[in-house]
Image: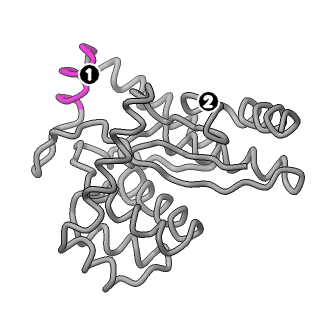
Amino acid sequence: MKIDFVSDVSCPWCAIGLNALEQALARVGPDVQASLHFQPFELNPQMGAEGQDIVEHLSHKYGISAEQIAANTEAIRQRGAGVGFEFGLGKRSRIYNTFDAHRLLHWAGTVSDAAQRALKHALFKAYFTDGQDPSDHAVLQAAAQAAGLDEQAAAQVLASQDYTAEVRQAQGFYQQHGIHSVPAIIINDRHLISGGQPVEVFEQALRQIAAQA
């Protein structure tokens, strides 16, 4: 089973969805063998290098109050805790550009699927748990090292424009095929599951698709 996980490293529901999907895969294994690939999606492709205050950004983008943002943040924190992901309280205060993080993830995917997955987890932790800037090359290099990747090779990728075209092409492909929100989980290039669903929803879908196959 091929699974494409379309997401952004600054998307909280993507962090929740990944943990839930992995738990579902553990439940259906070894009956269902799956390869997991991470595909790029930028929630804020025009975001400047300095980033933006998160309350200001969400208020402007969605027209919601600071109180609503606080309530949503707490609901997300609880959902994360339910699948074993820690959102650091008060740590995530800004939204940043994530394009270089996607370039690094693409490079990690050329190393191995396992390396790419480990880097994805490290990037989620860096931003959501530790409140670090995922556009900062030092942060990205540290995430690569935490994922078991060669830090110097990661630094060389970040210092170049490597994988820029590949990331742009992948983003365009998924947008042209109707992906406008994330996470979007595409199974065997045919079946779409949208959003950070509960473990049980992913498990049921995996079993149904495997049975059809």
Query: Residue 126: x and y, percent?
Result: 38, 60
Viewer-proximal residue, 110 or 22? Answer: 110
- Crowd class of label 1 (few under 14; some 14 to 19; many from 20; radius 10 Å): some
Q: In this picture, which residue range is highlighted in magenta?
A: 55-64
What predominant SS class does the magenta segment belong to?
Answer: helix
Q: Mark 1 highlights which residue?
A: 66
Identify residue type, mark 2: Ile
Residue 52: image location, x then y, percent: 15, 40
Local crowd size for mark 2, using a 10 Å CA cut-off: few (<14), some (14–19), many (≥20):
some
Q: CA distance from mark 1 to mark 2?
A: 30 Å
Viewport quadrant of the C terminus: top right
> Of residues 199 and 69, which is closer to you in this image?
199
Task: Looking at the picture, tell me which residue is in the foreground, 213 or 39.
Answer: 213
Q: Examine the rendered structure and indicate whether residue 89 appears above or below residue 175.
A: below
| Label 2 SS | strand
Q: Amino acid at mark 1?
A: Ala
